[in-house]
Amino acid sequence: MSYEPNVMRTALARLDRRKEARERRRYDLERALYAQAPRLRELDAALRGTMADLALLAAGQRPVAADGPEIAAIRTRNEALQAERAALLAGLGYAYDALDGAPACPRCGDTGWADGRMCACLKELCAQEQLRSLTALLNLTDEQDFEKLRLDVYSDAPWQGQRPPRDNMKRIIQVCQGYAQRFPDYPLKNLLFSGGTGLGKTFLSGCIAREVSHRGYSVVYDTAISLFASFETRRFSRDAGEGRQARDETRRYLGCDLLILDDLGSELTSPLAQTSLYEVVNSRLQSGRHTIISTNLSMEHIAQRYSPQITSRIGGLYRELTFYGEDLRLR
């Protein structure tokens, strides 16, 4: 699972701020309780003293047995101090570990990583930041949800010799809902949304992006124009900072769990655009990553506009879902 660098940085910063806020609260409580019960400060100092005594014994000239009398005496004193401290805290209305600064996530100790993998706590923060980013790009609202889809806005009359748009959308929604809710195990890995404007392609893209992101997977949404601009900058820019940012952008297109590429065909056709699209499509197919392409072009027009290598991969390895009917935005 590979989140965008900006998403990861923001999530880690939020994790750090949470840790700092908990430590401030612990410190403020400690100061307040010390003022209320000065004996508590003395007990904490004495407990630290027992730890120092153990360290001195360990660093001494002669070996000390773990079950010897010196260590036993320190352990007995430590346990007595802890018992008095717990009783004092209970009398003040607090648990024995109220000042211990326990991490919010015991699995990773608030580091965000456990056993070499991203912990669930950091994954949740990444998902939240990713959804915030997708909301800005896709104009996501609470209405863009599978549960709130309205089929009654589509005509139930046959359309130009085809089944009614409403029946067609029932089939499309069923595929999209299964794709999102069973991601990444749905039988179809790659989808091609084709059809005119105002038929729900971007709306369904938003529904899928929301669901897959909520399930903890990295999602990148962008337009074809922005994607090709990043590849162009990566290749031709002489500014180090700009080039580095472009490389980060292109890596996120190639490495995310789900890429949603919107409005393919709106870009100017050029050899670089052809090469960039082939790199994205082919590398994601080879790595087994999932992609959704949305376009106003039919497969016939894709074949006319793009290279045979691109056309064969999209035509052969993507499931085309064709949207048709009256432009809902005009209605």
Image (tube, rainbow, N blue to C red):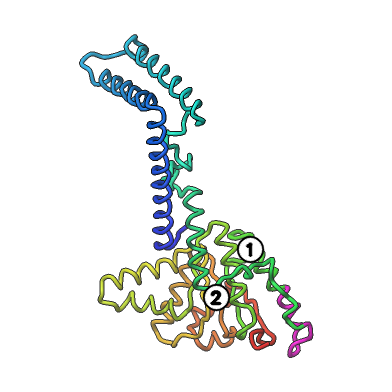
Q: Name the residue nearer the viewer: 259 or 74.
A: 74
Amino acid on which the number 2 mark rests in the picture = Ile
Q: Quadrant of residue 327?
A: bottom right
The C terminus - image quarter: bottom right
Q: Which residue is mark 2?
A: 293
The relative height of residue 88 versus residue 77 in the rendered view (above or below) is below
Looking at the image, which residue is at 61% across and 59% down? Answer: 185
Q: Quadrant of residue 99?
A: top left
Q: Position of residue 301 (x, y in %)?
A: 56, 88
Instruction: Please identify the residue farthest to the bottom as the structure is shown.
Output: 160
Amino acid on which the number 1 mark rests in the picture = Pro
Q: Name the residue nearer the viewer: 98 or 193.
A: 98
Looking at the image, which residue is at 43% across and 63% down? Answer: 4
Q: Which residue is mark 1?
A: 187
Q: Position of residue 274 (x, y in %)?
A: 43, 81
The relative height of residue 46 versus residue 189 in the rendered view (above or below) is above
SS category of the residue bearing label 1 = loop
SS category of the residue bearing label 2 = strand
The relative height of residue 121 versus residue 86 in the rendered view (above or below) is below
Q: Is residue 223 left or right of residue 300?
A: left
Q: Is residue 48 left or right of residue 220?
A: left
Specify the segment rendered in magenta. 156-170
